[in-house]
Amino acid sequence: MSHILPVIIAGGTGTRLWPLSRELYPKQLLNLTEDVSLLQATIKRIIDLPDMLPPLIVVGEEHRFLTQNQIAELGLTDEITIILEPVGRDTAPAICAAAVCARARHEEDTVILVLPADHLISKQQEFLQGLEQAKELAAAGYLVTFGITPHSPETGYGYIQKGDGNTVLSFVEKPDKKTAEQYLTAGNYYWNSGIFAFSIRTFLTEVRKHAPQICATMEESVDKGRVDVPFYRLEPLSMEACACESIDYALMEKSDRVAVVPVDMDWNDIGSWQALWDVSAKDTDGNVVQGDVVLEDVHNSLIRAENRLVAGVGLEGTLVVETADAILVAPLAKAQDVKKIVKRIKADKKEEYRLHKTVYRPWGSYTVLEKQPRYQIKRITVNPGAKLSLQMHHHRSEHWVVVKGTAKVTCDDKVFLVHENESTYISAGHKHRLENDGVIPLELIEVQNGSYLGEDDIVRYDDVYGRGS
């Protein structure tokens, strides 16, 4: 029997789960229903299965270190290759890149199992049964899609119409309520899960036939890419020239080699706060509650507090999500419209669509404590053994006060230590670097002063993480 190569698609931003999900901290990296993220749950679901090869994970460039850290938490750093997309081009180019990379490493009859990183599957045994059937069909030369047995007339999913055996009669876009009810009654319509299985050979043959431009540009992007362990960096210019299309539109709706495997595995794509409420454990009043929350006469609501006490009185079917820099309040039934709010926040050039107060970096993190026109205060944490880039700022000076650990500081030609309760000052225009040679996290308060405090005022001269200026 052929081996199975998991390809985990970990792009996207999950705007309907704002303010918890942000552009630089998307939903697949969040712990929403258990003590691991959706990405980690996806990896754990398949990593120890028989005939399963180490996965390929496709992520955007900006999410690479967070993804790497979550893989490291599972103890799998040496086993997983992370393919970096320099630009987002939807699922067809992402899967094509993974297939081309896989062809260079594995036999062409190897079955690729495509898994979105942000889905919840509660019935593992049913998933495994569907996987066995999909593997057989993929080995026989089919492009296999997993169809989820519907239990309600959902309007947020596309549908697959099944014919005799495993044949697919049609792919259907998201229907209105009346049409979805008709699909449910018909009994041969399934939710389109976005989970696929096919051999490397079949996929590349079919994508060359039905999406030749995508295939050619992604083959070029892979061929011109480079290894940067554990990453494989796709070449930017060729990928930028690639069409932006989903795998359904580019291939699955056009090929005559498509098969569907119906599966009832308690699947949910956690596409909104309503979806999260649906799958989460509830109290006796039907509420899903997380964090420091006090409720009085509140029913069938989702209340989530990340940083402070949230109190609610007399609410019904209400959504309240609190983070350090934003609070969302809405009827739970309007959860799909959160993406409209995010669109407006982005149009207004507010950073809250993109960043949290705490921003994660490969060396640690920083939290913005206060920001005013000519000064900014941050709390910086540097992990043991980590160091920031050797850098310079044109428009700001920085004053560092160490509150925990010992900082190794480079300023121009000087290298010195700054201990707890000590400080140092870095003037604008001076090359500098911050390091933690200790065994405990280094924590410091940074006060920035200057005419411009943006993160793009960084000129990097040396960086162990491969970031440019």
Image: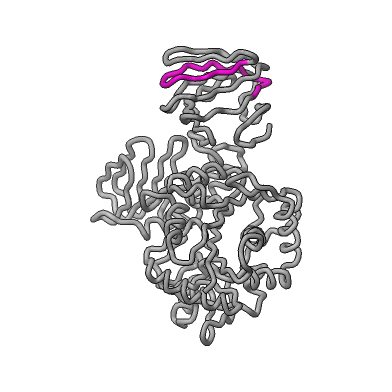
Query: Which residue range is magenta in the image?
Result: 391-411
241 relative to 114 in the view: left or right: right
Residue 450 appears in the picture as rendered: yes
Q: Nearer the viewer, residue 251 or 70?
A: 70
Task: Return the x and y of residue 368 as percentages of the image width and height.
Answer: 50, 28
Which residue in the rendered view is the most extreme toward the left? 284
Q: Nearer the viewer, residue 188 or 296?
A: 188
Please, what is the dominant secondary structure of the magenta stretch?
A: strand
312 relative to 442 in the view: left or right: left
Task: Return the x and y of residue 457 as percentages of the image width and height.
Answer: 66, 27
Query: In this rendering, is residue 466 above or below 398?
Result: below
Which colouring convention does the figure follow? one colour
Q: Is residue 410 magenta?
A: yes
Q: Residue at x 46, y 56 (%)?
A: 43
Query: In this rendering, is residue 14 above or below 253?
Result: above
Task: Return the x and y of residue 224 as percentages of the image width and height.
Answer: 74, 51
Q: Residue at x 42, y 13 (%)?
A: 421
Task: Return the x and y of residue 50 as percentages of the image width and height.
Answer: 44, 66
Number of marks drawn: 0
Query: In this rendering, is residue 355 above or below 438?
Result: below
Q: Residue at x 52, y 30 (%)?
A: 386
Q: Is residue 168 magenta?
A: no
